[in-house]
Image (cartoon, rainbow, N blue to C red):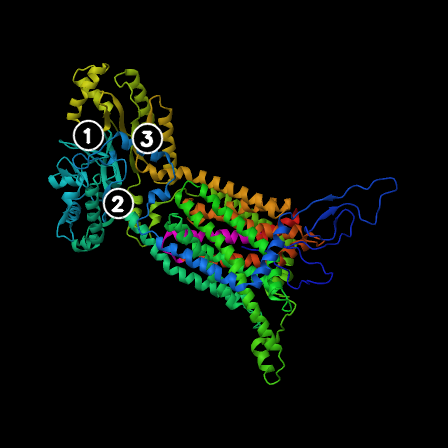
Amino acid sequence: MISSKVAPGEEEQGESPSKVELGEAEEQREAPLEGQLEAVPLDEAGPSWTTGPPLERLPPLGQEAPPPRRCHTNCLEAPLSRGFQRFGATVGANPWLFLLGPALLTASLGTGLIFLPKEKENLEEQYTPIGSPAKAERRFVQGHFSTNDTYRFSASRTSSETNFASILVVSLANSLLEPEIFKEVSKLDQAVQALKVVQENGTQILYQEVCAKYKTLCVPPNPLLFSWQHNSSLNLSDLTFPIHNTPTQLIYLAGFFGGNVLGQMTGKSQRLVESRAMRLLYYLKTEDPEDSERSQAWLTHFLDHFNDMKSSLTLEEIEVVYFSSLSRQLEFEATSKTVIPLFHLAYILIILFAVVSCSRLDCIRNKMCVAVFGVFSVAMSVVSGFGLMLHLGVPFVIIVANSPFLILGVGVDDMFIMISAWQKTSLSESIRERLSNSYSKVAVSITITTITNVLAFYTGITSSFRSVQYFCIYTGTTLLFCYFYSITCFGAVMALDGKREVAWSRWLEKPDQKYSSLKKSCCVPFGSLIDKHGEDNHPMNLFFRDYFGPFLTTSKAKFIVVLLYIFYIISSIYGCFQVQEGLDLRNLASDDSYITPYFNVEEDYFSDYGPRVMVIVTESVNYWDNDVRQKLDKCMTQFEENEYVDKNLTEFWLEAYMQYMNSSGNNPNDKNTFMNNIAGFLQFFPIFTYDINISSSNEITSSRGFIQIVDVSSSSNKKRMLLKLRSIAENCEVPLMVYNQAFIYFDQYAAIIENTVRNVMIASTAMFIVSLLLIPHPVCSLWVTFAIASVIVGVTGFMAFWNVNLDSISMINLVICIGFSFDFSAHISYAFVSSTEPSVNKKSIEALYLLGYPVLQSAISTIIGVCVLSAAKAYIFRTFFKIMFLVMFFGAAHGLIFIPVFLTFF
């Protein structure tokens, strides 16, 4: 992305020493002092350095001179530079070939865009860890336990998410436990159940036809509301929570009422004094594919007409929010449409920035049109990269829509570098020679930065999240095309523009007294002179040399920089411990989505109770053996004593069966008696029918109980709960497993840190190896490592201050962070250690003079490329901007401020 450039004002002829820059062969240096590096003539293999005594001081007679120690520091860089020099000459000699070839390649690969997916994106597959334990647990549950949503539905017993509609009712008064409010809620419930879908063939889909049933009735959306509707004399001021006893049944209220004020204990429950919110859950048939399709049609109708229905009811006592099992998917797909208009704005801003950056005062050196084509070549790389991946069948996920914004900012950096190198060439040279010289100076630098960025992305393929894998594949491949088009078609455009420069120069120098003044006023305004020798003293380079560099190397400035870095690193480390883990599923929708207030109400009023978790005995055990039952009881007790479990809401068939056996006078320790009485037990307690899996040989192959989770509203609590429950199950003497369908998403909390650390370590190692091979100076490798670690810590820490979670989306950006940190740090440190200046302060000033403006250009262009995402209404895009801004800001700060100062100390 950034590269060192030839110093403005540098002479390319005579004996004046040239500035050392990354990506071009080092020139001959002087060694006036003994023991310093002594320059030897350059040969065809590139520069060689010898360390030894000066030539004029020969050893005494009879003593053999020590052999010089040679350190070849450019075994890869020099041949690459010569290869690009020849390649540049070829492009300069055949510009139309290298212009039309990539254009035809783009057109052919662009046909892959017709394969952009039209089907729905599977959120679970893309945003949950590959091979997570919960997925294996789900397969076990599905293989050993059946359900029946047409006759005996139980939400806690389902292995995967069912079709449902959920309404949260919030009372405008202090409590909704009033008959008047219940009447209004009942009116809302009746209106929902009255919704019907009229299909194209005239048939209707009624709620009563698609609802999940328990026996012959639809499962009540709220058990207390259902009881009140059938018995209006029910005393709402005399309720107990979480279980309310009535003369005929037990009413389970946990999860159905929130914002509760509880009073004195009554048995295992407490008196429900006040309740602010109520949940209505409408479960629909899911198991049969035809029933599921009809259920989804009813849910779609529900979502389309809910607001109209709510308005017609004129609810005065309550506020309602709604959600369905389809909502997350539908809203996630809608977010991709919100970012499409931002593409146009991003390209306009980048074109404006490119035009301003590449404009010159004289019409010959002006590169505005070339800059516009440079942005267009980046667009070609996006079309080619995406088209190739779609041809190969790589899935396109919505998060990949972030990629063009990043590539747009990164791609124009190579353009700036190549234009800058071209501006250093002489108009008196041929086009072939000028392009050859330009390529020899900067093509290696562009190659290095491309390799580091592509490697950083391709290391993301090791992630456990498919969305991360696909994003990294698309972006890494597109960056390769961006590099390929930069050295081919963009180089060809510069060659063609070079012909225009020659033509304009001849026209301007043509003796024509009549129009001479007009030519100069139009093409050379403000009396500026045309630089025939290729020297380009850009004002920003002079600013870094004459003002910024000298200021930064003063003692006061260094002291301030050290204090600033100490504050930065302490704040970053503190922030690292505050970062929340995992992707909040509400963030997959846009900010103005109806599901956002739903999740807010749920978090405010219903966060006390989490899911009901299955505790599964995975193998056949001797339940009639008293020792086995004691081991099971011990394990269940450990679960109940866990801080995230409500011990009063445990449900286990074996406990109820032992009471049944004891009350009937049967011996539970006899195998035959134990097994033969299960059928009679299930007739009295049919709820346990699907909790006992009995084989044809009359063996209990597996069974399950249930525990109630509490206080897991935060991601950190979800992770700790999951790990503790699995640990208890693993350490139990009886083979146990814990599972709930929510664990599929909870597993991301346990996997995200491991994935992030692994990806960062792999990418950092790759960067370190590249720095040793292509930037051959050990000091540079150390500073690259320091900068990568420092920027990653800073970005991670400040994520917490900007309300960004550590999830699969931000993990992508941390991988990107490594590539950018490498670019900013490697070039500055290499320019410093390679400088021939006598003092460390002057070395630092020279490094800033050579690279300060490229670093600044790189940071600004990338920020411009992604800044339009700050206006996005979706978290998934806005987060990308936030982290990329932190990456570029901290990366540029290290390259322009911290590293130049720290290098003067060490």
Provide the residue span drawn in magenta. Answer: 871-894
Q: Secondary structure at mark 1?
A: helix
Three-letter code, disc 3:
Val
Structural distance between the alpha carbons of marks 1 and 2:
25 Å
Q: Is residue 508 above or below residue 772?
A: below
Residue 278 visible within the image: no
Three-letter code, disc 1:
Ile
Question: Tag on residue 9?
Answer: none
Q: Is residue 453 above or below residue 265?
A: below
Q: Secondary structure at mark 2?
A: loop
Main SS of the magenta segment? helix
Q: Which residue is mark 2?
A: 325
Q: CB of mark 3 within 8 Å of CB of mark 1?
A: no
Residue found 38% across the figure and 44% down from its top:
583
Q: Is residue 343 above or below residue 559?
A: below
Three-letter code, disc 2:
Ser
Q: Position of residue 787 (x, y in %)?
A: 56, 47
| Residue farthest along the bottom direction in this orientation | 514
Q: Which residue is mark 3?
A: 738
Question: Tag on residue 687?
Answer: 1
User: Tag 2 or tag 1, which sits nearer the N-term?
Assistant: 2
Along the horizontal axis of the image, is 354 left or right of 773? left
Q: Position of residue 360 (x, y in %)?
A: 56, 69
- Badge 2, how many Cα within 10 Å: few under 14, some, many 20+? some
Along the horizontal axis of the image, is 191 left or right of 269? left
- Badge 1, how many Cα within 10 Å: few under 14, some, many 20+? some
Residue found 52% across the figure and 56% down from its top:
859
